[in-house]
Amino acid sequence: MSAEIELQLETANTDSEKKGALNFFKMVFVKIGVLPFLLIIAIIVFAVTSDNFLTSRNLSSVVRQSSFLILVSVGQMFVLLTGGFDLSVGTIVALTSVVSATAMAILHTIMPDSVWLVITLGCFAGILAGSFVGVINGLGVSLLNVSPFMMTLGISSVGFGVALYMTGGTPVYGMPPEFGNIFGYGKFLGIPAPVFIGGVLICMLYFLLNWTRLGRYFYAVGGNTKAASLSGINTGLVKFLAYLICAATTAIAGLLLTARLDTGEANIGSAMPLESIAACVIAGVSLRGGHGRLENVVLGALFIGLVQNGMNLARVESYLQTVVIGLLLILAVIADQLRIRVMKSLYN
């Protein structure tokens, strides 16, 4: 009998250890999501595929090229937190690029000796144009209760049409060379300009989201709009500010991308809606709103850039790269739904 009892005890201990380990992995999955696992897999695959992937030069290039998507994704996160999404971020990038480049080109011919005034006015015009799109989106969603999908999709079409009409489909040249040399290829404190500017903005937005009352309002509105309204939060204003912040950060990304390309392009930014939403969802931002961390979104955007860079080194065709990004988005959505189920099973 004693042998049977010992066997039963050992079996019970083994089962409890298995359940404990399973619950531990579930907790880890709920806390960190699917992104760390995807990062590890991507690094291993591309390191095996290409000897140049893990070089410092290539990794620094990935960070610099990802800085544009990081800014757009962080802005997209604010909208997702409130339970919406912005499909017009590509339009904002295009409009900012075209308006800023056109303004600089015209002013540079009028005031060739006032380079910094030309750059300042051109940047202001571009950010104003991009932010205006956010104002329209915010008013449509918060004031008129238009569906975020229909509102931002319609504005996206209008904005791209305006950008193409302004340029006739051709790039805009004539900007001061200093604009591209400093903001596209220059360095601040030894850090590439796009990375430095992006880092400063991310720190500011991190402080806003995690250390201010307004930051808590974004989570509250996305978590339960009716409860937030009953608590005295102006939900319409919070949603409006989310779209405005998204447009402003995207406009800055458009300016930096324009400086990098040294031309104003009406066709840039077309992939930004898909990639920014994919970066957010991969980072654990819930499509239902109310959940997500800014630092994870930065890693999510870096992951997208890492995958694109790895596929370029592996000589994967650009059309197939779009397929991969789409599949990653689907995988991230499935993982998000699975994480919600695991969370309910743990806490119920």
Image (tube, rainbow, N blue to C red):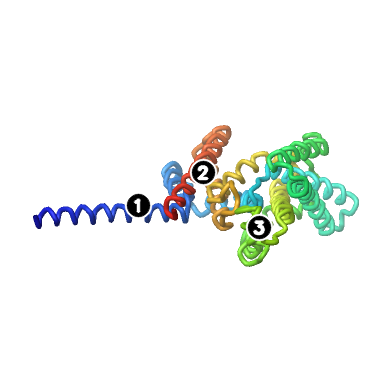
Which residue extends farthest right?
110
Nearer the viewer's eye, disc 2 or disc 3? 3
Residue type, numbered disc 2 = Ala
The residue lying at 61 percent from left, 46 percent from top is 276
**Relative to residue 135, is residue 32 drawn left or right?**
left
Kind of residue at disc 1: Leu
Where is mark 1, residue-wise? 22
The mark nearer the N terminus, 1 or 3, is 1
Front of the two marks 1 and 3 = 3
Secondary structure of the residue carrying numbered label 2 = helix
Q: Residue at x 73, y 46 (%)?
A: 141
The residue indicated by pointer 3 is 228
Local crowd size for mark 2, using a 10 Å CA cut-off: few (<14), some (14–19), many (≥20) = many
CA gap between label 1 and label 3 equals: 36 Å
Across and down, in percent, residue 296 comes to: 54, 55
When asked about the image quadrant of residue 231, the answer is: bottom right
Quadrant for residue 162, please give it. top right
Residue 273 x %, y %: 65, 42
The kind of residue tagged 3 is Ala
Question: Does the CB distance between marks 1 and 2 fall below 8 Å?
Answer: no
**Is residue 313 at least partly visible in the picture?**
no
Report x, y in % for residue 216. 63, 62
Q: Secondary structure at mark 3?
A: helix
**Among the two numbered marks 1 and 2 on one chain, the one whose residue lies closer to the N terminus:** 1
| For residue 311, above or below residue 134 | above
Q: Position of residue 83 (x, y in %)?
A: 63, 49
Residue that numbered label 2 is attached to? 332
Mark 3 burial class by Cα count in 10 Å: few <14, some 14-19, many 20+: some
Report the residue at 61% width, 41% height from top: 274
Answer with mark 2 or mark 3, whichever residue precedes in sequence: 3
Report the residue that reaches farthest toward the front.
230
